[in-house]
Image (spheres, coloured by chain):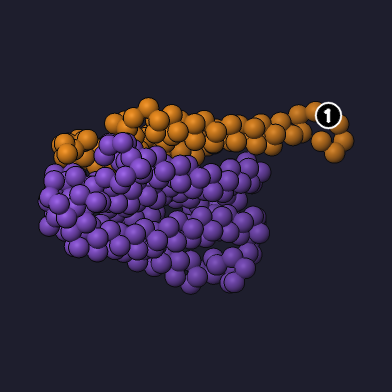
Chain colours: A orange, B purple
Amino acid sequence: MTPAVSRRTYLFTWLTLLGLTLLTTLLGFINMGPFSIVIAVALAAIKAALIAGFFMHALFEGKLVRVAIAAGVIWFLIFVSLTLGDYITRGWLPFPGK
Amino acid sequence: MSPEIAPLALHEQFANPNQQRETASFGMWIFIISEMMLFGGLFVAFTVYRMYYPQAFDDGSAGMDIVLGSINTAVLICSSFTMALAVYSAEVGSRKLVSAFLVLTMIIGAVFLAIKFTEYYKHFLDHKAPAVWFDSAGPGGPKIELFYVFYFIMTGLHALHMIVGIGLLMATLIRNLAGQITAAYYTPIEVAGLYWHFIDIIWVFLYGIFYISGLHK
């Protein structure tokens, strides 16, 4: 069977991942206040997308698998946004006990 | 297709090998998504407490060993690369290369675990083992301890997945040596690879939230 992804692509993915890790670490030394963790997580998300897309062949799968992955990610984002939406907005209203 | 691999290559309930392959891949992805929710719950809990105690969580993060953590991230990315090459070798039907890359992946995975447990040992010596031996003197002590609780549970669960992953690769290696993995049927190694790469993805996020967030201190 013809491989879904070539060795050259794997090599570039691997090198890009190592490069992004180095970038993550170097940016970590700069104090950006609350944005430090935001940038760290954003870079992690890019690395995760590269691993899923090329190493896990997500980009080369059929529609069924791609829809399932997208549903998983979207469901997780709903979970995150509703939970954080609750915790972030507590204390916005001037009621006692809120 | 040689006769001895024909029964494995296509099971009777599938219309064609491609449908069979996609079914296995789909099942593994569904499992990975359920794992994503398991780790996701921990990530969200961590985020909520980090919003409540940003100072203490940064202080906790500053106590991490960035050198060992960064080396471990690179180590795990390398193991993902060798795993991808193992799947590639299976696709082109090279049994020897499949075995070689599987062994290499397991060794690199073991190196990761060795470095991880060295870190745990150092935390213990630094009295940073929550509930067992935690030096919570100083400002924000109990809150920093909470950071370490998350750290040990999440990296511990990740390490557990690594151990399971090495076992899975061992089983795949045995199947490969028995000649059950061919260019016509390599689904076992492909789904084992999916699991291994997923563990890598989890670590990439763990590295970001535990090691990087307090690095500037």
Secondary structure type for disc 1: loop
Which corner quadrant of the image does residue A46 belong to? top left
Question: Does residue B203 show up?
Answer: yes
Residue that mark 1 sits on: A94
Q: Badge 1, how many Cα within 10 Å: few under 14, some, many 20+?
A: few
Question: Does residue A32 show up?
Answer: no
| Residue B78 higher or lower than A27, as above or below | below
Image point (61%, 46%), residue name: B45
Q: Position of residue B107 (x, y in %)?
A: 26, 63
Image point (33%, 48%), residue name: B191
Q: Is residue A52 left or right of residue B129?
A: left
Q: Quadrant of the N terminus of chain A?
A: top left
Q: Position of residue B151 (x, y in %)?
A: 52, 56
Q: Is residue B88 left or right of residue A62?
A: left
Which corner quadrant of the image does residue B128 belong to? bottom right
Q: Position of residue A45 (x, y in %)?
A: 42, 36
Report the amino acid beneath label 1.
Answer: Pro
Foreground residue among B140 and B37: B37
Question: Subunit of mark 1?
Answer: A
Image point (59%, 36%), residue name: A80
